[in-house]
Image: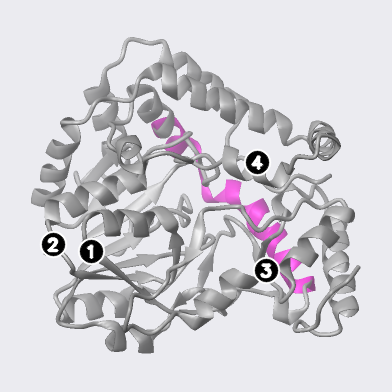
Amino acid sequence: MIPRKKLDIGWRDLAFGLKACFANPDDAAAQASVENLWSPAGNALALFSVRSGFDLVLQQLALPQGSEILVSAITIGDMVGIIEHHGLVAVPLDLDPATCAVRPNVLERAVTANTRAIVIAHLFGSRMEMDGIVAFAQRHKLFLFEDCAQAFAADGYRGHPDTDVAMFSFGTIKTATAGGGALFSFLDGTLRAAIAERQRNYAVQPASQFAKKLLKIASLKALSYRLPYTLFVGLCRFCGNSHDRIISKAVRGFAGGDLMPKLRQQPPSALLALLARRLRNCTPAQLAPRIAAANTLLQQLPAPYRLGTEAGHHTHWVLPTQCAAPDALVAHLWRQGFDATRGASSMIAVPAPAGRAAAVEAQRMMGRIVYLPFDTCGLEEELGRLANAIGRFDEACGTMNSDFAD
């Protein structure tokens, strides 16, 4: 079985992180080091996670209860949960499937006198053009969050220069993962200082907990080699368990339980030291093979299966495809030896509140989505086999709207 995802971290990085867990902690020095590396101008703040930072900013903004926040209609479900925790209302902005970008014509229709902020998420490794969105936010005096959690490209991009807060994640399955952590770029230095002060009131995550996280990542990395992964999938089937559910749960950063206490922590110095190491060593050249593999596969897929391929900038953090019978496609690819999945992330289509228009395209996209294991295919020949498997599935279906029975 070809595994679904290659974790973007080396064994030496994991060893460095584990060693740092047992060093004398100097949290302030580690924080300053990684922040200066991200922004020599002093605009950065290192945080426990994107969710943690988003919660902190909403605490500081203290928007009136019931205020609306416009959000990209596909996002992490926890982001909507945090909005609702603060007594606010998430209003989805529908997307263009060709680019995975917010449709320009939905912005003016969505804004009301009760709208206070907007959260724009760059999806699946793509990066949408922000000038028009920045102008819209400025025109309506909206606080602009730019969610770059899936869009780190090691190319120096730190968010649009006029974005109020740009948020980057380095969680388990992200590019240049450090096993967690986030870096925010702030437009307003006063806001950055206020958020930093709020974060200092949190307890630092114990180094022992971060060490456990790194050991789990090491286990997932070891499992992702083909022979052990094939044995793992076979064992799960023999025991009547779903390997898909086990893996999807294992890579989620905040699975189960009450979310907010888990978010409200400071990152430990070992995490920050590892994050600094990853940032120093990650280059666009390291992402080039992944991008090339995605482009090779996409060129061979039937046109209706392509999603987001017209985005102007794309690093293909993951490669989603769309299909009218997604569960059948996953089962078909499993039989062909490719571990496709529908649960590669915690993404949802944001439901519309009462009285607001539903994000129809986003709902359709998430209802049809399948993530392909393109970056674990070692050879162009294997990418061709994957494309051929999808082509045979498409022929068996007749059309994307037909029921599929293998």
Q: Earlier in the sequence, mark 1 or mark 4?
A: 1
Amino acid beneath label 3? Thr
- In the depicted view, which residue is nearer to us: 357 or 304? 357
Residue at image point 28% right, 31% down: 266
Residue displayed at 61% across by 45% down: 248
Say whether residue 284 is magenta.
Answer: yes
**Distance between mark 4 and mark 2 Cα atoms:** 38 Å
Q: What residue did someone put label 3 on?
A: 321
On the image, numbered disc 1 is attached to which residue? 88
Q: Is residue 99 above or below residue 176?
A: below
Q: Identify which residue is drawn at 26% across, 54% down.
A: 85
Whether label 1 touches label 4, CB < 8 Å? no
| Relative height, residue 100 to residue 222 (above, below) | below
Q: Which residue is mark 2?
A: 63
The answer for how far apart the CA atoms under marks 1 and 4 are is 33 Å
Assess whether mark 1 and mark 2 are in contact (beta carbons under 8 angstroms). Answer: yes
Q: CA distance from mark 3 to mark 1?
A: 32 Å
Secondary structure beneath dot 1 equals loop
Q: Amino acid at mark 4?
A: Ile
Magenta span covers which residues? Answer: 276-300
Q: The C terminus appears in which quarter of the rendering?
A: bottom right
* Residue 247, numbered label: 4
- Which x, y percent locates residue 208? 42, 16
Q: Nearer the viewer, mark 3 or mark 1?
A: 1
Distance of mark 3 from mark 2, alpha carbons? 37 Å
Chain-order first, disc 2 or disc 1: 2
- Give the distance between the C-alpha atoms of the residues marked 3 and 4, in whole angstroms: 20 Å
Any mark on residue 347, and which?
none
Q: Is residue 22 left or right of residue 327?
A: left
